[in-house]
Every structure is written in C-alpha cells, then in structure tokens.
Amino acid sequence: MWGGVAAPSSGKSLHHTRREKAGTMPENVLDCLVIGGGPAGLTAAIYLARFRRRFQVVDAGASRAALIPTSHNHAGFPEGIHGKALLSRMTEQARKYGAHIVPGSVTRLERRPDGVFLATLDGEPIPARTILLATGVVDREPDLPDVPDVIRRGLVRHCGICDGYEALGKRVAVIGHGSSGLHEALFLRTYTADITLLSLGRSLVLTEEEGRQAAQAEIAIVEEPVRRVVVEGDQVRALDMLGGACRSFDVLYAALGSDARSDLVRGLGTRLDDKGCVVTDEHQRSSTDGLFAAGDVVRSLDQISVAMGQAAIAATAIHNRLRGVPSPRGAPDDTLSFSPQDLCTCCSRPDARRH
C-alpha cells in the first residue's frame, strides 16, 4: 500500500513508475510529501493514511525525539517511554494503514509554475501537490573539553519542561551564555534551590534586572572555564574548573538554543521568524501556498504533544484542501483566519455543511 492507496504493482517507487513513458503517460504526483519522520511527521502519516491520501514520508533519521532517554510528561505512558520506542510505535501504527516511509534526506525543494512542488531525494525529483515540513531543530552543543556530542550521547538534558520534575531537590547546573541560560535556570528553580549557571569561560552578559533576578533566586553564577569533565555512566557528574575547583552536579542542562532545519524552504521565500522557524497560521499553513509545517520547525512550544497536535491539524487541512474545501485567506499575516473546527465538516452544524 502507498499511503492508504495501492502502490504501483511493478514494485518501483511512485516517482520512478512510468518514467520510461514520461512523455506519453500522466505524471504521478503525490498528494503530499512529508519531510521528517519525528512525532510530527509520523502523526501526519497516520492521519493521511487514514484519509487514503497518496503520500510519502522521508525520514532522515535525525529526530530529536530519538535522543530522549525517557519521557515522563507524554500523556498515556505513566511509567514513561523512551524516545526511540515512541517513534517505533508511531511508525508501526502509520504502516498499519499503508503509510510509505523511506529513509533519506530531501536536499532541494522547489515549486513549478503549475504549483506542484519538486523535492529532490537521492538525486531524483518527487512531485507533490502539497508539502508538510516536519524537520525539527538541532540543539546547539556545549563546548566541553574532550567530551564531544554530549547531547547526542544523552549526557546532558536540554528541556526543563520535559524533565524538570525529575530534578526535584537535586544539584542542577545550567550551561548558558546570556538571558536564555538565566531564564532556564529560573524555570528550574521551581524544582530545586541548588542551581548553578555556567558560562564555560565566556562572559555572561546579563542586564541589571536579570542580575537581580539571579541573586533573588540564589542562583550561583560561574564564568570560569572548564578544564576536565567527569562522566559517570550516561551523565556528566562533575566539572573540574580551570582554577582547580571541582563542582559536582546531579543534573546538567544545556540552554544554548537550537537551529531550525528550515533551509529547504528559504529558496521558496517562505516566511520565517528571527530564529529561522516557519511562521504558520492556525491550520499550519505557511506563507507559501501548499506548504505546511508542524513540530519544532514551527514557531511554537517545542513539545511532542504540540508537534502531534499541529500535525493532526496540518494533515486535516491538507486533506480538505485536496478535496476542494475552501480555506479563506483574507486575514492579515499576523492573524488567524478561521477556527480548527471549520476543518472538519463532520463536526459542523448540519445547516453549515456545504459538502
């Protein structure tokens, strides 16, 4: 099955089928190409498959969710769930309904004059009527001596909203270089009184008001460089400072920000915010007609539950767009045009239905 619709019997992928007769046969165009195989992309896959749409998911295998040791704030899992286990379950569920998920990376995205998108995957073009960008973000790594890829290895945490509760009463260190680091430290102050803000040798630029906030919260500030990192198991346990002091911690957070994986849509002129995230409306539509976005690549709260909700909205909007349900676009860029309930005609009042 191909996204809920039978795939070509030749066994070739959709964009290879009929290539030999491209000049005489109709072009096979996907209803939607989902770029990204994290929680947003896989949620969209489940919805699009159940909507019986012709689509494909391209998964580069770089979902940030895979780095989560155990998520305790994702609803439905009282004992928590590992990020990879969650992705595996979602993949299984999507494939149950015929979703076609392929490994790889889309390296180019353009739009033809007829409105059809062309995505380049492994050097081959894939035509699609709509695109759902669900590529997420990349966390910035702290520069710790002799310990590369600390986030990839799960040695530090980067989401106080996700797992701050697990730091209750513990000794917490936050790596940050300015306001963002302080804000993370202040957020974690909800869970513990023992917090140190580390700048790793860089000057910590705080306003006078921010300095007062740190002092009132009794957050220790250390700007000294780190000489050596003590790793025990899967955690950074202590930092030997350049001046000779050894500082021990139970939990280490990195609050250095992230970079949105939005380069694919820059060439389309898609509106991005100052952090490179895609700006969308209430239905996850971007400023580029036919391009939708969901998950961390969108300007929003970076949470799995939010990504899944956005993907559900986007997939439903894509489905309704393709079946001809009108979507008013008369509102200004910074306003939302109409409510999500308008996406679902089965939930609207009988006298309001037009289809």
Image (cartoon, rainbow, N blue to C red):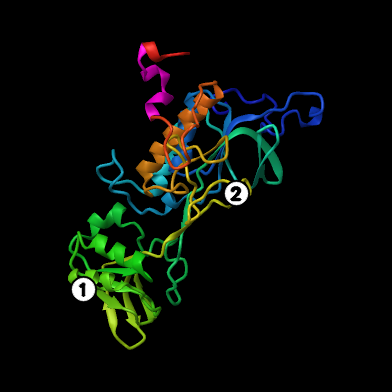
Residue at image position (39%, 44%) is: 85
Residue that badge 1 annotates = 215
Depicted 230 relative to depicted 105: above or below: below
Across and down, in percent, residue 256 comes to 40, 65
**214 sits left or right of 318 in the view:** left
**Cα distance between the residues tagged 1 and 2:** 43 Å
Residue 169: which quarter of the image?
Answer: bottom left
* Image quadrant where one finds the N terminus: top right
Q: Secondary structure at mark 2?
A: helix
Q: Which stretch is magenta?
A: 340-350
Instruction: Note whether residue 92 is visible.
Output: no
Q: Looking at the image, which residue sits at the far bottom?
A: 243
Query: What kind of residue is marked 2?
Result: Leu
- Residue 334, numbered circle: none
State the image coordinates of residue 126 (x, y, percent, origin top left).
67, 37
**Residue 197 falls in image quadrant:** bottom left
Magenta-span inclusion, residue 35: no
Q: Is residue 342 magenta?
A: yes
Decide which of tag 1 and tag 2 comes sooner along the chain.
1
**x then y, percent, for residue 130:** 58, 33
* Residue sticking out furthest to the top: 351
Q: Is residue 157 visible?
A: yes
Seen at 66% across and 29% down, the residue is 29
Q: Dominant secondary structure of the magenta stretch?
A: helix
Residue at numbered disc 2: 264
Q: Identify the residue shown where x is 67% and y is 35%.
A: 127
Give the structural element (helix, strand or loop) at label 1. Answer: helix
- Of labels 1 and 2, the one closer to you: 1
- Tell me the amino acid under the disc marked 1: Ala
